Amino acid sequence: MAPRRAEPHRFLTYLRPARFALSLLLATGLAVACSGGGRSGVAGVVVAEGFSIEEVVTGLDGPTQLTGFGNGALLLAELAGGESEGTGRVVAITVDGERELLFDGLLTPTGVAVLGDEIWVMEQRTLSKGPITGGTLTPVLGPLPYNGRSETTLTATPGGTLLYGTSGSLAADTPADASGTLWELERDGTSTPLSAGFKNPYAHVIDGDGGLWVTEISDGSFDGRGAPDELVAVTPGVDHGWPRCVGDRVAVEQYGGDTAGCEAGPPSHALFSPGATPTSVAVAPWDPDTLVVALWGEERVVTVPRTATATPHQPVDLLTGDLRPQHLLADGDRLLVVDFDGGRILSLSR
């Protein structure tokens, strides 16, 4: 019989998910009233029974992470071109629908967050900050170790720190120094490793009880086969095993993994297919015991119960169809979904 699954660490238990009054949606007349029946106002998008979804922002160019910006505005990072073209930018979308360019010339901006009066941006190998009014970014950390693709999103905690990850790369079949790690950054630039043993701890969320949840993008071949992507509960100080262990504690012989050692490690809370690419996780606005995950590679958004079980949860479809979900942002009773390919933001209501 499998051991009982680990409960998530109570990460700074006073923390609560931030909520933003996105009055932009009301001010521009784009908000949609909640209604049942699985109604979709978006062509080609299928929504689960009891939910409705509408477009609220369009005309974006490779949008990545979305966050609240205060006073009802939104802050958004965009590639605005190819991944490595250096054309990325951060824009503010004001309450009257205007878009203001704050920073540009960025290299693969995958993360953006606000701490006090500063904006933090994660680029391909650099973590920078700049004034909330825009202008020039100042590098704080870099060059960061990475796996040749990208780093992670950013998560600002109500405690005034920042969570970020470095994607995993190998040096002689072991993780390269400081790679594959989830970090906590103080505003003075001091970083502390929270947990290691990841291929790419891409997205993070803190639930209403202070539990820390992270998506793992496994990406690669292990003993000749692909590894599933994961949603995991993170306890600071615990190594998640990559590359010796992948998926739900499966030993990888080519990297020296052994069954007993992997089974002693942290379990997967949910498993996704290899290549599913979970780029975001959020706590469902309609149920604090439901986690919502964006599966970029499978073009769907799924739900996973927060409750621990003896075996990994199987995800349930929430949104499918013509969308490439990149990021999720909970706000009040709605969930905002960034559609990368569609260059838009969708609003999901129950």
Image (cartoon, rainbow, N blue to C red):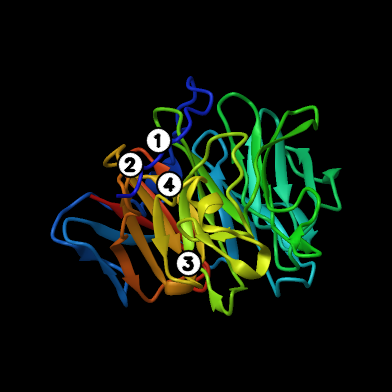
Crowding at mark 4 (Cα within 10 Å: few <14, some 14-19, many 20+) = many
| Kind of residue indicated by mark 1 | Glu
Return the residue nearer the eye: 87 or 327. Answer: 327
Whether pointer 3 and pointer 4 mark residues with C-beta atoms closer than 8 Å, the reply is no
Sequence-first disc among 1 and 3:
1
- Residue 293 lies, with reference to residue 209, above or below; the image says below
**x, y percent for residue 142:** 85, 49
**Residue on which disc 2 sits:** 308
| Helix, strand or loop for disc 2 | loop
Sequence-first disc among 4 and 1:
1
**Residue on which disc 4 sits:** 282
In the picture, the disc for residue 228 is 3
Q: Residue at horizontal 76%, vertical 63%?
A: 170
C-alpha span from label 3 to label 4: 20 Å
Whether pointer 2 and pointer 3 mark residues with C-beta atoms closer than 8 Å, the reply is no
| Kind of residue indicated by mark 4 | Ala
**x, y percent for residue 329:** 45, 47
Whether pointer 1 and pointer 2 mark residues with C-beta atoms closer than 8 Å, the reply is yes
In the picture, the disc for residue 230 is none
**Residue on which disc 1 sits:** 7
Return the residue nearer the eye: 246 or 288. Answer: 246
Q: Residue furthest left?
A: 37
C-alpha span from label 1 to label 2: 6 Å
| Kind of residue indicated by mark 2 | Ala
C-alpha span from label 2 to label 3: 19 Å
